[in-house]
């Protein structure tokens, strides 16, 4: 009689454990759903990372683009910023070369 109670108790505990494994908190179905959710979130994170990199590159291009435009305006058009002094050095011929700022007859803006 005693072995029947022990057996019944063990079978009952086994049933409870199986119910927890299949339907309870941390069940196989829940773990599988969380894995799928994690994979989706990792894909979303990767897409966001790529978008952030593209935006950072675009910001850098815009920043460098402004510097490039400013450099061209200074060299070719002789433009200066407010509170700067424009100095033009002319060569012996009295001509003003374009492009190379280090050559004789070039101009420069001093801050």
Image (spheres, rainbow, N blue to C red):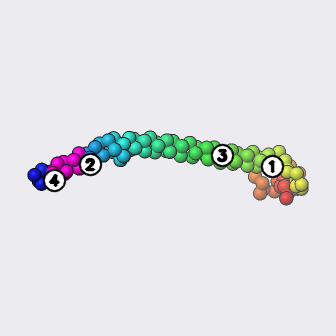
User: Which label number is shown at residue 43?
Assistant: none
Q: Residue at x 12, y 50 (%)?
A: 4
Secondary structure of the residue carrying tag 4 is helix
Location of mark 3 (residue): 59
Nearer to us in this view, 24 or 36:
24
Gap between marks 4 and 2 measured at Cα: 16 Å
Q: Is residue 17 above or below residue 102?
A: above
**Is residue 59 rendered magenta in the image?**
no
Local crowd size for mark 4, using a 10 Å CA cut-off: few (<14), some (14–19), many (≥20): few
Left or right: 97 in relation to 41 = right
Location of mark 4 (residue): 6
Nearer to us in this view, 35 or 48:
35
Local crowd size for mark 1, using a 10 Å CA cut-off: few (<14), some (14–19), many (≥20): some
Left or right: 54 in relation to 32 = right
Q: Residue at x 12, y 54 (%)?
A: 2
3 and 4 marks in contact (CB < 8 Å): no
The C terminus, quarter of image: bottom right
User: Which label number is shown at residue 74?
Assistant: 1
Left or right: 30 in relation to 44 = left
Q: Residue at x 28, y 43 (%)?
A: 19
Gap between marks 4 and 1 measured at Cα: 95 Å
3 and 2 marks in contact (CB < 8 Å): no
Location of mark 2 (residue): 17
Gap between marks 2 and 1 measured at Cα: 79 Å
């Amino acid at each position: 009689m005693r072995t029947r109670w022990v057996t019944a108790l063990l079978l009952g505990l086994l049933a409870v454990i199986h119910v927890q494994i299949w339907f309870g908190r941390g069940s196989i179905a829940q773990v599988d759903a969380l894995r799928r959710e994690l994979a989706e979130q990792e894909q979303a994170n990767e897409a966001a990372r790529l978008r952030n990199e593209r935006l950072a590159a675009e910001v850098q291009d815009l920043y460098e683009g402004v510097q490039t435009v400013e450099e061209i305006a200074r060299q070719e058009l002789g433009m200066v910023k407010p509170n700067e002094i424009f100095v033009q050095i002319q060569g012996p011929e009295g001509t003003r070369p374009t492009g190379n700022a280090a050559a004789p007859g070039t101009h420069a803006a001093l801050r």
